[in-house]
Amino acid sequence: MQPVGGGAPRPGPGHRLSGSLRQLDPAALLMLLLDADRPETVRSGARELALFLTPEPAAEAKEVEETIEGMLLRLEEFCSLTDMIRSDTSQILEENIPLLKAKVTEMRGIYAKVDQLEAFVKMVGHHVSFLEAHVLQAERDHGAFSQALRRWLGSSGLPSFRNQDPTWVWLGMPEPAPSHLYQTRGGPRPTCGDLFQEVYPSQL
């Protein structure tokens, strides 16, 4: 080591640097050599100025850590949401869509049955209209016969079941009934031939 200008001794040409000094980069080594030539007061002032100008890493590091934690929390929420969407999609593809296909096939069969029922109802309505027309035509054609039949039934003297006395109802007779029970009121009843002649006189 050779003293230079009364300052700190500098290494000579044959002096080897220690291991810690060899690991420093050239810029740091140059600053170290320059600081060796300065007085102690200058070096202490430079250190204080360097400490003053050096920012405190604690606050910035804490802020960065909080930001990273928030991002990790949001990433975890996003991953859980993605997993839920994936499970719902798998359930829809594996369970709901085949069920919907089966329901669609079933509804097609129901629609076909409804169409058949509509055709059947139309056919029944057509037949009912046809029968109603024939009934009306028959009533118009045979109205005189029904009136003559009612007159014949009225003139036959048949007892009315609504106004009949219960004492005249014979449930069982061990002996032949008296002949006066079979007598009818009024004149002789017309026969079927007389009734037909009255309705259709031109055919006899």
Image (cartoon, helix red, strand yellow):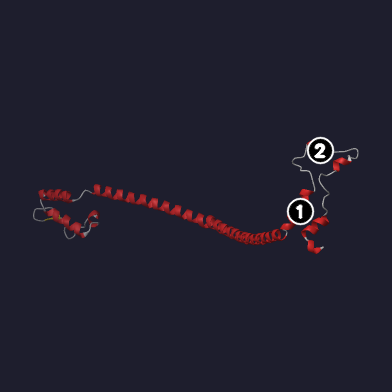
Q: Amino acid at mark 1?
A: Leu
Q: Is residue 1 left or right of residue 128?
A: left
Q: Position of residue 115 (x, y in %)?
A: 60, 61
Mark closer to the observer (2, 1): 1
Q: Is 123 situated left or right of 72 in this image?
A: right
Depth check: give the residue in front, 166 or 56: 166
Of 143 and 6, the residue lying toward us: 143
Query: Horizontal placement of 79 versus 202: left or right?
Result: left
Q: Is residue 129 above or below residue 39?
A: below
- Which residue was labeled with disc 2? 168
Instruction: List x then y, in percent, for residue 188.
Output: 83, 49
Identify the residue shown where x is 16% and y is 56%.
Answer: 31
Q: For the view shown, which residue lies furthest in the bottom direction?
A: 202
Disc 1 is placed on an element classified as helix
Give the image quarter of residue 167.
Answer: top right
Q: Which amino acid, by three-letter code, is at mark 2? A: Trp
Which comes before the other along the chain, label 2 or label 1? 1
Q: Position of residue 152 (x, y in %)?
A: 78, 51
Residue position for label 1:
149
Quarter of the picture containing the C terminus is bottom right
* Quadrant into which the N terminus falls: bottom left
Above or below — where is 132 with respect to 70?
A: below
Q: Residues within 10 Å of mark 1 (few under 14, many from 20)?
A: some
| SS at badge 2 | helix
Instruction: Give me the residue at 14% from left, 54% from top.
Output: 35
Q: Nearer the viewer, residue 80 or 55?
A: 80
